[in-house]
Image (cartoon, coloured by chain):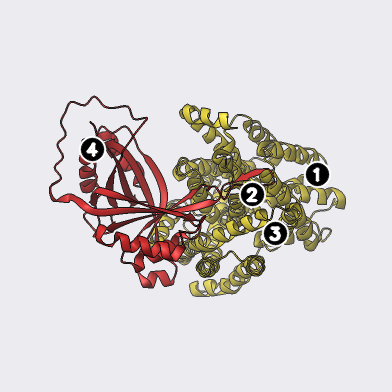
Amino acid sequence: MNIFSEKLKEVFFSVLPVTIIVILLNFTIVPLGYNLMFRFVIGAMFIVIGLTLFLLGVDLGVTPFGAVLGDEITKRNKLWIVVAAGLVLGFFITYAEPGLLILANQIDTVTLGNISSNSILIVVSAGIACMMVLGFLRILFDLPLYIILNVSYLIVLILGFFVSEEFLAIAFDASGSTTGVLAVPFILALSVGISAKKKNSKSSEKDSFGLVAIASVGAIASVMILDIFSKTSEFAGVLPSSQFENLSIAGVFIREVSPAIHDSSIAFLPLLIIYILTLLISKSISKRENRRMIFGFIYAFLGLIIFFIGVNAGFMEVGRLIGSHLVEQEKYIFLISIGFVLGIVTILAEPAVYVLTHQIEEVTAGYVKRRSVLVALSAGVGLAVALSMLRIVTSDIRLWHYLLPGYILAVALTFFAPKLFVGIAFDAGGVATGPMTATFILAFTQGAANSYPSADLLADGFGMIAMVAMMPIITLQILGLIFKIKNKKTIKGEEKSL
Amino acid sequence: MIIYDLNVLILKYGMGSKAIALAKACNITGGTVLLGKGTIKNSFLSFFELAESTKEIVLILAERELGCNFLERANSEFNLIKQNHGIAFSVELSNIMGVTSHKNDVENHCQTGGDLMLNYDSIFVIVDKGKGEDVVDAANEAGSRGATIINARGSGIHETSKIFAIEIEPEKEIVLILTQNDITQRVCDKINQKLELDKPGNGILFVNKVNKAYGIY
């Protein structure tokens, strides 16, 4: 067993559930047709291979590089270097995020060009850059995470009163879109790299998480501020839906190749530039490390391309079809329960979830098991998707009916849950909304919203990502509470060290 | 006098908890699991930087009788006889604290037979993070077969420092190598020479005699 076969096996078993569920659906409630089914299965294979390569690359290249960089930034012991590095890293990583570009284009269309996609990209990237600096300083000056999160969410709450309802959904969705497939492992590794050196191992453990969470809040707040200042009142009610021509199975996959290469290249570009800069400045990277990182980057790059092709060609349309089919058949109970199941199984195949759960296991030396984090995460995402479906078929529920109590609960829990889990939980919120959710589940939701006569595509179709980003925060903190109760002895030790 | 041994098992990822459960079934109070990575000797895989595998290291303290019994059972349970299923060995301890002694009247006679291997040594090398692989290379050059790397942290007398508000403890790697004792000295010399352990701050190395070993070929 080498790391490749280890990863392959693990990935295979996490993509398997979603494949089985869809195949079962195909033979029971939602017949997909031979062509689409075949595409789905091939897509699943692409995802398995792509994900394996990508995660391998993250392990060999991205994570070590993040750790080295975190080390380089802090060891000079100069404040301005930390601030400058945080600003530059935050800005460029966000700016290059494919998910953010898609979101920005959607906002551009929806606001009838009132808010241009370029201004969104810049404002959100700047917002995240500032929060990134805050996140760095937090680790270095030992500020507790929950205080920062509470203050930030309070600001978000106040901003929320001034923001139009359509934008509320967009803003919370932004938090999910910006912390994408490549940014998450890199940010996680950075914070581990900075905090790993702390002498007090307990505090270094809990400081390893939370940077993604802080960045997510930055995205929410900056989109809200943008809306308040631009005072948009007119909205277009339709999203440009991409037309699916009748192509052969191979044709669909070939069509997706060049966008996938394009997206992956853009996502990797800032990382590559930062890497080259680091090589020029730092002298402490050995030849061996260097070689390994380069191989890692190549694996991750190839893996990401294959993964994108598989998701876009195989999964997207299947998701949309399942959603619209269930609504057209007026099987609303099915819609909600299938939403729940799809949420549970899809999250298992999300790349960043992998990285986070492994990181958790490594940092806590196996004390917090991957399995228990995955269970809590799946349950949270399942609930989130089910609740979003409920919102589509019952027009009375508004998004803030979920978000307000949800976030109040999430923030309240920060006072009771073990601090390690607070960081993990808020990070998981950003992590859960990766490319799988943004394509498969989003397509499912939009398919359902499109077919339901009274559902508003804009208000109902967005929002889902916001829900997926919120629910894990709650469920993981509850997991933390369970750990606390079950394991009183260890927690007492932790409190003493706080 | 009761002799205590430190039993070390290096197993595939995910097997650590099973090993502890097995230890408990053998009347041993508990154990500690660490995550580590093992190296694989394969030039094809190492060209692609894939010659690694995730391992779990299980440390179990036990009386010699219980430990023997446990290792025997672990050997058959985890199939250590087969290649690449993991290794297990025990090291004699000179002092132990914090272990509640068992009032165990049952005589667990160890049926070790030919498995008793007195001709093995375990080498521990503690170096700065990133240098673990160099140690493994040096050891392999001198004829050893493989190694396990464990992430750790710690600081010597030269290394305490402070950055902003945090006190720094540098990250380290512990390399664990099992060798036959006829080449132990050669391996140690090679590592010493490659990593210049004689100079302060470059790392430390120590060797323990192994009582029993399983799963080495």
Measured as percent of width and height from the top left, residue A184 is found at 60, 54
2 and 4 marks in contact (CB < 8 Å) = no
Q: Earlier in the sequence, mark 3 or mark 2?
A: 3
Q: Earlier in the sequence, mark 1 or mark 3?
A: 3
* Inter-mark Cα distance, 3 to 4: 55 Å
* Inter-mark Cα distance, 2 to 4: 49 Å
- Helix or strand or loop: what does disc 1 sit on? loop
Left or right, B91 with reference to A16: left
Viewport quadrant of the C terminus of chain A: top right
Mark drawn on residue A212: 2
* Inter-mark Cα distance, 4 to 1: 71 Å
User: Disc 3 sits on a residue from what chain?
Assistant: A
- Helix or strand or loop: what does disc 2 sit on? helix
Q: Amino acid at mark 3?
A: Leu
Which chain is displayed in red in the rendered image? B
Mark drawn on residue B64: 4
Residue at image point 64% right, 40% down? A394
Rendered hue of chain A is yellow
Residue at image point 66% right, 59% down? A99
Residue placed most toward the observer, B129 or A307: B129
> Closer to the observer: label 1 or label 3?
3
> Closer to the observer: label 2 or label 4?
4
Q: Amino acid at mark 4?
A: Arg
